[in-house]
Image (cartoon, grey):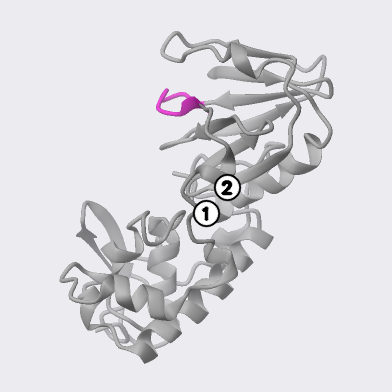
Amino acid sequence: MPELPEIETLIRQLGNVLAGERVRAVRIFDEKLDPLPDAIDRGVRAVRRAGKGVEIDLGGPAIHIHLRMSGRLHWRSPGDIIPPHARFGIVFEAGEVLCIDPRRFATLTWHWAPAALRKQTANLLAGLDIPDIRARARGRRLPVKAFLLDQQAMPGMGNIYACEILFAAAVSPWRRAGEVTTIEWERIAAAAARILREAVYCRGTSISDWRDLFGRPGEYQRRLRVYGREGKTCYRCPARIERRKLGGRGTYYCPGCQG
């Protein structure tokens, strides 16, 4: 599933190609999705990240796209062929935003509430508010990795980057969130700021399906320190990386320096 750096990559690319554009048509290729007739002829005011979703603001009302497990957005210039597995397209004068989704899990919805009235969520790229995070975690018995994946506390955080952040901070994924110290939260916050920004710079992590708006793979997979390295020697100590399930997610960690 695309995580914060992948979605941030998309909104920055969409912000560039959709500046000054108006919606000319919404084409639905999959009967599971509903049409969006109210979007026609509305101008794009902004493109935002909403957790793991993409929001195209049309002056109050907005189109919300969630790519789920393996969906991706593709920019189709006029005259280009439509790739296989296209589920919908949002047509503009300059081109078309297509959703390519073989598994058909991605969603396309329409919000009428003005952006100012919708619940605002934290922006992890701006840094973690440690007092707020500590207050949210106080007394929580769930593992800290599960806490990091809570979209109410950490909107946009996903499995790959949670593993990388906890490894960089040398904190066990199984440590109870309520027992994480202020110093450990500071290490987690510093690691999150660095890793998420680097991953955005690299246009995300391409392990399987992820491609950016123009079909290019990301590059952060070359910088992964723990995710996907089961059985390999840790970069920081002689132990070998292990993989265990936590909350149904494959969790990569070093038993030597995250023990």
Q: Earlier in the sequence, mark 2 or mark 1?
A: 1
Can you tell which quarter of the image residue 214 is in?
top right
Spot occupied by residue 170 in the image (x, y as percentages of width and height): 36, 84
Q: Which residue is mark 2?
A: 49
User: What kind of residue is marked 1?
Assistant: Leu
Label 2 crowd (10 A; few <14 / some 14-19 / many >=20) = many
Q: Can residue 84 be seen in this snapshot?
A: no
State which region is magenta.
Answer: 101-110
Select label 2 or label 1 by which is in front. Answer: 2
Spot occupied by residue 81 in the image (x, y as percentages of width and height): 73, 15
Residue 136: mark = none
User: What kind of residue is marked 2?
Assistant: Arg
Residue occupying the point 48% across, 11% down: 30
Spot occupied by residue 92 in the image (x, y as percentages of width and height): 77, 21
67 relative to 201 in the view: left or right: left
Residue occupying the point 71% across, 41% down: 46
Residue occupying the point 47% across, 13% down: 34
197 relative to 191 in the view: left or right: right
Of residue 231 and residue 189, the one placed in the foreground of this image is 189
Q: Which residue is mark 1?
A: 4
User: Looking at this rendering, what residue extends furthest in the left direction?
Assistant: 141
Label 1 crowd (10 A; few <14 / some 14-19 / many >=20) = many
Rendered view: 247 above or below 170: above
